Image (tube, rainbow, N blue to C red):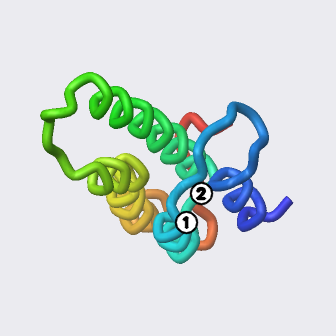
Amino acid sequence: MSTHTLLARAMADEVGPRLRTLPDRVVELLSSLGSPPRLAAHLRAVHDVAHQLVDWLEQRCPAATFDREAVLFGAATHDTSVWRTWWSASPTRSGRTSASPTWRNSS
């Protein structure tokens, strides 16, 4: 299975736990960056938990003010810059090219 197919499945498929799909603009961002499927799956899980927390907060603390969309977008993209920094530094550290990234502790 291609990395592109795995990335698409990680962002939207209903395989595994029932998680909300990532917002379209996040899917576009991750796709354009060529993000690894593992990162997309992690971001999707964090985004789903953020949704649950935001819903809970709105129900139990209706006077609380916050930017719901900013919280959800932040949850869905929070590790993207970390990954980009690691990716751009990796060829000089290990000799890998940007076409062949690997992740530590990947399964």
Res. 23 visible in picture: yes
Q: What residue type is labelled 1?
A: Val
Q: In the image as oriented, which residue stretches furthest toward the bottom?
A: 32
Say if 84 sits above or below 47 in the image. Answer: below
Q: Is residue 3 above or below residue 76?
A: below
The residue positioned 42% from the left and 51% from the top of the image is: 76
Residue ID at (58%, 71%) = 31
Residue 97 appears anywhere in the view? no
Picture coordinates of residue 36 (x, y %)?
A: 59, 57
Q: Mark 2 points at which residue?
A: 36
Q: How many labels does the image show?
A: 2
Tag 2: Cα neighbours inside 10 Å, few (<14), some, or many (≥20)? some
- Is 20 above or below relative to 60? below
Location of the N terminus by quadrant is bottom right
Q: Which amino acid does label 2 sit on?
A: Pro
Disc 1 secondary structure class: helix
* Residue 75 - label: none
Q: Who is closer to the viewer here, 10 or 22? A: 22
Coordinates of residue 8 in the picture (x, y in percent): 70, 61
- The picture quadrant where one finds residue 46 is top left
Is label 2 or label 1 in front?
Answer: 1
The quarter of the image holding the C terminus is: top right
**Does residue 51 appear to the left or right of 100 in the view shown?**
left
- What residue lies at 33% left-to-right and 60% top-to-bottom? 81
Q: Name the residue under label 1.
A: 27
User: How would you rate the neighbour count of disc 1 (Cα within 10 Å): few for under 14, some for 14-19, many for 20 or more?
Assistant: many
In 3D space, how far apart are the residues under numbered discs 2 and 1 (Cα atoms)? 12 Å
Q: Which quarter of the figure has residue 97?
A: bottom right
